Amino acid sequence: MIFGIVGLGLIGGSLARSIKFHSDNVVYGADINETALLQARMVNAIDDTLTEENLGDCDVTLIALYPQASVDWAIQHLNAFKPSSLVIDCCGVKRYVCDRLYPAFQGGQAVFMGGHPMAGRERSGFSFAQDDLFENASMILAPAPGTDVETVRRAKEIFLSIGFGRVRFTTPKEHDEMIAFTSQLAHVVSSAYVKTPLAPKHKGFSAGSFKDMTRVARLNENMWTELFLENDDLLLAETQHLIDRLTEYRDALQNRDEEKLRQLLKEGREIKEALED
């Protein structure tokens, strides 16, 4: 099988490395950064550069760019994909991408499917790509309505074969609702948390809690700005829910309401325990 990967940053680079680690598949890679291409070649993450000429040989094309760039690249190459091949984006939002690419690919020679590898690091670029980044991770897939069962099964088997622990199927709306909560809100909270005036003085006073809360504040602001704005309605709702809950804790502290504070903490503990179970 031949894979084409567009964008060899953290996600695209890790996909390339994972494919080569878990299989003998051929990988072609493309990136505007010549250094990333050179690094990928040096560690044998790719076999060759993905070009206009060999794109049509790819059985699976993975687009690991920002959302708007992913849409633009896919549409520009609509007629160059191999017939019946899979084209899957790797963006952190799905409505924006799928609303544009479902109709673009309808009736075409390749099959588009929304995708999102559920793993990452707080650093970006091929230098931080890992061949085990997706070990035990979920690959989320959002097939277009009407996609045949065999194609869906084929997509699932492909991702399981290259190192993912599970494949979950969803709709673009459900994906974006859940990601607003599980990922985007966490980045908002972490970014806001490190802005306290006490943050520069933390050394010697901080341990695991501080490290856990601040890890994802080391983000790529260009990518996350685009992701936030393309999911603003759902992220706004989750942000407001968090503000409402924080207000309960603030009020309990202001009122020195011991029972209310104990109850809030108890509820949080019980929810966390239930989630782990």
Image (cartoon, grey):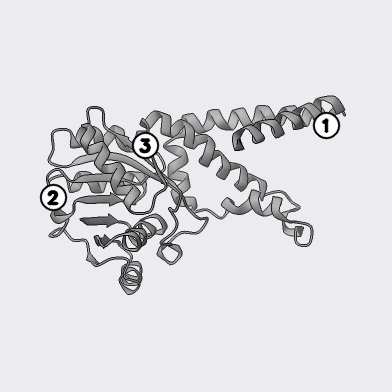
Mark closer to the chain start, 3 or 2: 2
**Image point (27%, 61%), residue name:** 29
Answer whether residue 257 is visible to the viewer in this image. no
Report the residue marked by disc 2.
80
**Image point (79%, 57%), residue name:** 205
Of 214 and 159, nearer the camera is 159
Report the residue marked by disc 3.
94
Of 140 and 216, nearer the camera is 140
Q: Say if 107 sits above or below 18 in the image.
A: above
Q: Amino acid at mark 1?
A: Leu
Label 2 neighbour load within 10 Å: few <14, some 14-19, many 20+: some
Q: Say if 90 sits above or below 9 in the image.
A: above
> Does 167 sit left or right of 101 as displayed?
right
Mark closer to the chain start, 3 or 1: 3
Report the residue marked by disc 1.
253
Q: Secondary structure at mark 3?
A: loop
**Image point (81%, 25%), residue name:** 260
**Image point (20%, 32%), residue name:** 148
